[in-house]
Each structure stands twice: as C-alpha cells, then as structure tokens.
Image: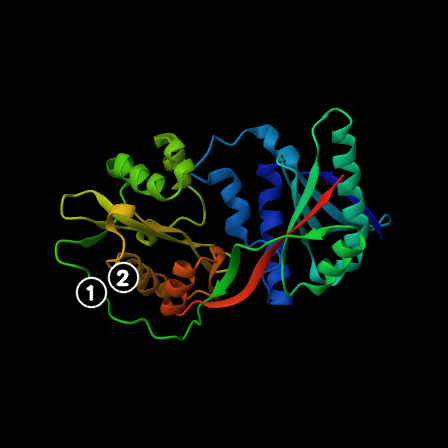
Amino acid sequence: MTLKIREFHWNSDFELVRDFLIESYNISKNLYNWIPQRFENRKFGPCGTEYQDEEDELVKIWELVDEDTNIKKIVAVTIYDPASTYWMQIHPDYRYLETKILDWIEAQIIDLKKTDKQRLELHFYVHDSDEFRISLLTEKGFQRKGSDECTRIRPLKMEIPVYHLPEGYSIKLVNIEEDFEKYREVMGAVFPHCYKMTKSLAEKYSKASFYKADLDLVVVAPKDDFAAFCTMRFDPKSKIAELEPMGTHPNHRRKGLGKALIYEALKRVIHYRPTLICILGAASTKAADALYDSLGFEKIDDIILWVKEL
C-alpha cells in the first residue's frame, strides 16, 4: 500500500470525507477529529464570506492505495487555515502516519515563508487527552499555549427539565426569509463577525444537510426583537447532534433565556434519535462553564493550542 496525497473537490469528495469522519468516530468514540457538521460548515457557514471553489485547495485527502487493484482508502484529511492553523483529521487505525503528514505540513509552511517575510507560526488545536499527538508535537518542537475552549457531551438518557420563560418572552422557529435582519442582529451582538452575514449566506446555510428548520430557534423579546438564539445541527448520516451556535443578546442576559432555549432544542432533537449530543469548542469562561454544567453538558476535554515558529 502506498500513501498518496490528492486534491479535494467538494462535489465529488464531500460524501467521502463525511464517511471518513463518521467511521473514525465510530471506531474511536472520541472527538479528536471533526464531526461532519464542522467540515460541511466550511461551505455553508452563514457568518463570513461566500465559499469560493478555490477554497477546495485548502483541503488535502491522504489515501492508502493498493497499486495492484487501485483500491483506495482515505486515512487522513488535512485542512489549512490561511492564518497558519492546520487541522489534521486522521483515521484511528493509521495514527502511525501522523509523523509523515506533519513533516509534509511543516514543509508547506516553510515553503510559504520563502515568499512571506513575516514571522510564520504553525498552530494545532489538540484535545488534552490526545497523548499521541501531544507527544509528537512536543518532539517536533511545538510549545503548549493556553486553552479557552473545551468539548462537552450531554448523556442521551439524561432528563430534560421543564423550563419557564420570563413574562413577555416566547420561543419561535426562525424563518430566514422573514426574520433575516433580526436573526443577523442577535447573532452579531454575540459574535461580531456574524454582522457580515448576508441574506444569500443565510439562505445557503439553510440548505446544508445538517440544517433542520425545526431545530433553529430564537427567543422573542416583548418588543419583538430577538433576545437569544440556538441551533442544533444534526448530521443525517451519523445522527450526531451539535449545539452550535448559541448565545444571548447582551441586553437580555441573566434571565435564563439561553437555558430555556437549549432545553427546547434538546426536546426537539431527541425525536431524531441522535447518537451523540455535543458542543465542540465550547467557551471555557466561568459563566459558560456554569451554564453548560447546569444543562447537563459534561466537560470531556480541554482543547489546547500548540504553536511552533518556523
């Protein structure tokens, strides 16, 4: 078997990558790799800019190829963020290939450095329990930095409590066509980059395979503005449910709106019989920890930034 690297093309390769990520999770039962929603969000995420075909070039597929039969198996997928962050998704049965892949990644960044006079750093975000990758990065001269995110999972059989909203507040489903301006406003108030959302991007988001209209919820305030939002992204193949995004407008905090909204989202997603309910990249602030703990989302892992100057 020969390890080969090839280009990624969304139309022909997305389902292959989705299947690779699902298989990896089903074997490992950890979240060291991305879940399908996160990969699909690269193209359908509503906050940012329209996905361009040339962004396919930032993804590489690594395959083991049988030269006699031409049978191919995806063993890794690498994703490059132009800010010098690399994401390495690797099949749990082929982790021995990580050194070779990391050497290739470093060579790519060093080659980029020849045309960029600025100091270049290579970043990896690693789960704190991933001893294999931590050992590899340490050996390669990476330095451990801080952590401000974590992974959380809510037990599927945990009871979902009854919630109560303050007087004058209500929960509704988002209608992207009719609610776009209020939708953008409440999301932008929590995540400023979401002010860049256009109606076209929001409509494209609603076409993602993980998007379920009955799992995209907002709290409506007494004056009819949106006070909080949350979405359960549900991958139809793996049946993994991800709470992303969620937030409460600064003008409406400390009223229990976020908790009530998430309980409603949990009540709804459970009808799809999810195999996992998770939050990836959950904030690790004191307030966020208190909220997620109270909702039953257990912290599984801190996510650590590792950095190397090249």
Report the residue at 52% width, 49% height from top.
Answer: 38
Question: What secondary structure is found at the residue carrying circle 2?
Answer: helix
Q: Is residue 134 above or below residue 65?
A: below
Mark 2, other Cα within 10 Å: few <14 / some 14–19 / many ≥20: many
Report the residue at 70% width, 44% height from top.
Answer: 61
106 on left or right of 176? right
Q: Amino acid at mark 2?
A: Ala
Which circle marks residue 308 in the picture?
Answer: none
Could you tell me residue 154's position as x and y percent?
A: 44, 68
Q: Which residue is mark 1?
A: 164
Front residue of this view, candidates 158 and 127: 127
- Residue 190 makes an appearance in the image: yes
Which circle marks residue 260 in the picture?
Answer: 2
Q: Are marks 1 and 2 in contact (CB under 8 Å)?
A: yes
Question: What secondary structure is found at the residue carrying circle 1?
Answer: loop
Could you tell me residue 101's position as x and y percent?
A: 77, 48
Could you tell me residue 63's position as x and y percent?
A: 75, 48
204 on left or right of 77? left
